[in-house]
Amino acid sequence: MKPIDARVRYTRMVIQQSFLELLARKPAARITVTEICQQAQINRATFYKHYQDVPALLEAMEEEFFEEIRQQLVNLDSGVDRFLLKLMRLTKSHGERMMALGGDNGDPQLMTKTCGLCWEQLRPRLASEHPEMDESTLAMIYAYVSDGSGSILRRWIQDGMRQPPEQVVALIVSMSEAALRAAGKGKNA
């Protein structure tokens, strides 16, 4: 893969930062390319060299975050709780960016997508640890856990990420384990 030129990286950074500043004030769906260009002090042609439109910009910024998560997913042997803690610390290290992207004006599904990505990777492990559950049950548990975890993380971000990540991870893990226990009891009933 060819390295990205420093000027290209700088231009993308300015565009993204300008978008985040606008996102702090208004919903992504109402932000225009013109506003981003004015904020970034670039022309529209420069914007369009890098992004097709505002939704493509938002998607690219989310994808950059997801790529960092995928890199963390390589080492899943450390356990779910440690992985979730890494995820939350990564989210917190992106502070303002994540508060804007995952906040009220950003993508309301960002953290659900993030948890979906994580749980999809964890799903084979879940299946091997619970062979008594069929694929349909695992799929429902997966949906419940990823959507619920995403909602918890979204609330954490909206609250300014003030609670310690360890406390939030403990809550997610405990609720996920409770869902698995309940599903296991339901199968035996």
Image (cartoon, grey):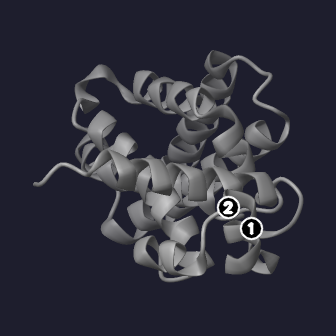
Q: Position of residue 178 (x, y in %)?
A: 60, 38
Q: Nearer the viewer, residue 141 or 100?
A: 100
Residue 149's disc number: none
What's the CA distance linking mark 1 and mark 2? 5 Å
Is residue 40 visible in the rendered image? The answer is yes
Label pair 1/2, CB-CB below 8 angstroms: yes
Q: Please name the residue shown 81% across and 79% down the image.
A: 30
Residue 41's disc number: 2
Give the residue at the far right of this rendering: 25
Among the 4 quarters of the image, the one containing residue 41: bottom right
Q: Which residue is mark 1?
A: 38
- Relative to 176, say whether 36 is above or below: below
Q: Secondary structure at mark 2?
A: loop
Q: Position of residue 101 (x, y in %)?
A: 67, 54
- Relative to 106, say whether 76 is above or below: above
Q: Position of residue 116 (x, y in %)?
A: 47, 57
Q: Position of residue 77 (x, y in %)?
A: 23, 26
Q: Please name the residue shown 67% across and 33% down the image.
A: 95
Tally of numbered tags? 2
Q: Amino acid at mark 2?
A: Gln
Q: Please name the residue shown 75% across and 29% down the image.
A: 161
Q: Nearer the viewer, residue 55 or 51?
A: 51
Q: Secondary structure at mark 1?
A: helix
Task: Classify the position of the N terminus by image quarter.
Answer: bottom left
- The answer to whether residue 142 is left or right of residue 36 is left
Q: Nearer the viewer, residue 96 or 41?
A: 41
Q: Amino acid at mark 1?
A: Gln
- Relative to 139, say whether 184 is above or below: above
Q: Nearer the viewer, residue 107 or 16?
A: 16
